[in-house]
Image (cartoon, rainbow, N blue to C red):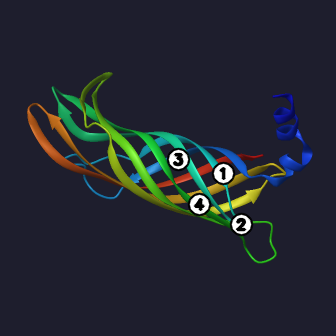
Amino acid sequence: MILIVLICASKSTFAQGRFSIEIRPGVNFATQKLGQATLETGYGIEGVVAYRFLEHLGVYAGWGWNKFGSDQKINGTNLDFEETGYTFGLQFIHPIGSSKIQYLIRAGGLANHIEVEEGDEIISDSGHGFGWQVEGGFAIPLGENFRLMPSVRYRALSRDITLETITTAVDLNYISAGLGLTWVF
């Protein structure tokens, strides 16, 4: 056990930088209505853990939360829509020429659900289902072990939502602009 700890803490292991942890807040812009609801600009946050298994290619997995207000009302109260769940996929990070700045490409899946909220009360939950995402951006070094990662992503999730005994198939499609802070170790 002590040997494993020493190996993990050694400078040579640290310098390889195969693992990373990222926190990414973002602003979200719906590309279409969600059923009959026009979504307002949303916001959210995501945490991601990644493992680089080749020089520029790795896998990632994480959890995220995103919230959208809407013009849809029940009993005079505007409804909010929250998307929460898991994200996973492949990421490719490669230097731009001889620069230290790298470009980032991610593609993967979602295992998310949509909650409909009236004020603080959840009035519908779609249950988890699969969707997909693609993302592009940059990795800008901040010292040896940190990166600033501005990116833009497109996400798509199709689920069924039941409101007042009416079930509707909805598509939550949006563009998210975010700024991640990543620790590489």
Q: Is residue 125 left or right of residue 140?
A: left
| Amino acid type, callout 1 | Tyr
| Amino acid type, callout 4 | Gln
> Marks 3/2: CA distance?
20 Å
Q: Along the polypeptide, which appears first: circle 4 or circle 3?
A: 3
Q: Are marks 3 and 2 in contact (CB under 8 Å)?
A: no
Instruction: Name the residue furthest top.
Output: 121
Residue count near mark 4 (Cα–Cα under 10 Å), binned few <14, some 14–19, many ≥20:
many
| Amino acid type, callout 3 | Gly
Residue 25, horizontal then vertical, whole percent: 56, 43
Mark nearer the viewer, 4 or 2: 4
Q: Secondary structure at mark 3?
A: strand
Q: Along the polypeptide, which appears first: circle 3 or circle 2?
A: 3
**What residue did someone put label 3 on?**
26
Q: Along the polypeptide, which appears first: circle 2 or circle 1?
A: 1
**What residue did someone put label 1 on?**
51
Mark nearer the viewer, 4 or 3: 4
> Marks 2/1: CA distance?
17 Å
Q: Secondary structure at mark 2?
A: strand
